[in-house]
């Protein structure tokens, strides 16, 4: 048995080593296509490709009366051109096994395409055709708006989704990032095809672009397609969203919101806060603090909430940042009858860390779990490419990708404790609970409670 365990450990070590070194720095090439910075992650393991176009603007470019305009523009990009219908476009791209879509945030947008390398040319030429000639037919806009409205009405059954959406808006309240990137039902009524085409032209001609690609050498054929078919150039497209905002002041006591939904027998809980610039930049320390608190089955909150008391099936925590702001969040749920007990446990854990610190064995466990799992982030070239893009966005050196495990293991208890207190100080938390109106009395023992109907977030 010992030999079997030893062999399994050796295999795991080899796999980890391959995962770490499979995409070494020698595989990363920096190129320039018509004034556009391009990062190529050479990956010849499979006959596939991945393309990510990073636009340096996002939902903050929306007109105040047409929130969600950028998100709708990108999401409806494939809904028709002057030459092809939505069905024609979808059938053509799916024939080549292409995956495509956009992720819009407040500060930036990423359009991603992937497929088989042998079909790179027809697939990417079709994508470029969409960017150059998307028409946004009125009938498709009407159907899209109706679909979004129906989704908003049916979300009442998905309390987890309500909690995440409400928490984001409420925890970012007072910052430039509090309004949802996809807007709300009332916003979309004001958006027309004229607005969408104007927005597309803005992203094509004015917004700065960076391109990230992974695949074998054949992917370099994409250069001529980007220049000739997409018509993109870095010469004039230089706009990059930069936001100047007044930092949010820390709370003196928790701010508690009860987002009411009918007929709920569970209480969804989200708590955390907005992180100003200067509070989220130590990504390795943020990750370690969150791993200790709610990073897995052996984390502090998981053992206190699930293992010892059976209050919830799961609990997680996260803290991180984007280019100009960040967020911390604790996420869990419980029965409506145990919401007060759950919050007492979380409060006591946070206060215990603040007052008594972290046990050496608990810190070592968190460091081992985080450092050991880190190499597996690099197994996928897509995940690795996203890391490179993120590091570029926050001006961080790629070398820190390879030093992550060593950095995590180097932290001492005082630094981790201080970071935990900073990120998850009980008195500085925005607490959002989704559940029935009857929970208000249970929540009031923790502070003043503001009731908000769930529909206000859609």
Image (spheres, rainbow, N blue to C red):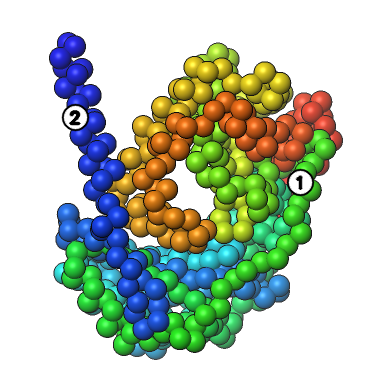
State the residue in front, 254 or 9: 9
What numbered label is drawn on residue 76? none
| Disc 2 from disc 1: Cα separation | 53 Å
Residue at the image position 42 percent from the left and 60 percent from the top: 389
- Image coordinates of residue 60 in percent, x first then y, are 63, 69
* Label 2 Cα neighbours within 10 Å, binned few <14 / some 14-19 / many ≥20: few
Instruction: Relative to 220, say whether 152 is above or below.
Output: above
Residue at the image position 65 percent from the left and 50 percent from the top: 278
Residue at the image position 72 percent from the left and 57 percent from the top: 175
Quarter placement of the N terminus: top left
Report which residue position mark 2 lands on.
Answer: 11
What numbered label is drawn on residue 452? 1
Q: Quadrant of residue 196?
A: bottom right
Residue at the image position 30 percent from the left and 55 percent from the top: 25
**2 and 1 marks in contact (CB < 8 Å):** no
Quarter placement of the C terminus: bottom right
Q: Is residue 153 left or right of residue 225?
A: right
Q: Quadrant of residue 135?
A: bottom left
Instruction: Relative to 123, say whether 295 is above or below.
Output: above
Label 1: element kind: strand
Q: Is residue 419 left or right of residue 84?
A: right
């Amino acid at each position: 048995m010992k030999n079997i365990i030893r062999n399994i450990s050796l295999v795991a070590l080899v796999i980890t080593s391959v995962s770490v070194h499979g995409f070494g720095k020698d595989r990363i090439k920096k190129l320039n296509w018509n004034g556009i910075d391009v990062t190529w992650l050479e990956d010849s393991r499979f006959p596939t490709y991945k393309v990510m176009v990073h636009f340096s603007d996002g939902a903050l470019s929306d007109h105040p009366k047409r929130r969600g305009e950028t998100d709708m523009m990108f999401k409806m990009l494939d809904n028709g051109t002057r030459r092809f219908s939505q069905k024609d476009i979808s059938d053509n791209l799916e024939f080549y096994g292409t995956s495509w879509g956009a992720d819009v945030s407040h500060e930036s947008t990423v359009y991603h395409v992937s497929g088989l390398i042998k079909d790179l040319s027809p697939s990417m030429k079709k994508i470029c055709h969409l960017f150059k000639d998307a028409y946004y037919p009125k009938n498709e806009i009407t159907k899209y708006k109706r679909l979004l409205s129906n989704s908003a009405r049916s979300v009442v059954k998905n309390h987890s989704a309500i909690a995440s959406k409400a928490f984001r808006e409420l925890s970012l309240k007072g910052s430039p990032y509090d309004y949802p990137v996809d807007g709300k039902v009332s916003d979309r009524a004001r958006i027309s095809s004229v607005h969408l085409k104007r927005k597309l032209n803005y992203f094509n001609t004015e917004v700065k672009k960076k391109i990230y690609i992974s695949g074998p050498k054949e992917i370099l054929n994409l250069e001529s397609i980007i220049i000739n078919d997409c018509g993109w150039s870095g010469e004039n497209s230089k706009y990059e969203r930069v936001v100047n905002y007044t930092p949010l002041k820390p709370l003196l006591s928790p701010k508690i919101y009860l987002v009411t939904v009918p007929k709920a027998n569970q209480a969804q809980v989200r708590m955390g806060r907005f992180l100003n610039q200067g509070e989220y930049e130590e990504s390795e320390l943020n990750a370690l603090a969150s791993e200790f608190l709610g990073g897995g089955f052996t984390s502090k909150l998981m053992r206190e909430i699930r293992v010892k008391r059976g209050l919830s099936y799961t609990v997680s925590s996260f803290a991180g940042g984007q280019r100009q702001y960040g967020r911390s969040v604790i996420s869990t749920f419980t029965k409506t009858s145990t919401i007060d007990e759950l919050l007492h446990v979380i409060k006591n854990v946070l206060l215990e860390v603040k007052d008594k610190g972290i046990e050496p064995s608990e810190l070592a466990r968190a460091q081992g779990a985080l450092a050991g799992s880190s190499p597996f982030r690099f197994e996928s070239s897509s995940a690795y490419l996203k890391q490179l893009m993120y590091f570029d966005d926050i001006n961080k050196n790629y070398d820190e990708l390879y030093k992550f495990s060593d950095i995590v293991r180097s932290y001492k208890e005082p630094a981790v404790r201080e970071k935990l207190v900073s990120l998850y100080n009980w008195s500085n938390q925005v607490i959002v609970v989704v559940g029935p109106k009857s929970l208000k009395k249970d929540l009031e023992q923790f502070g003043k409670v503001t009731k908000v109907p769930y529909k206000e977030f859609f």
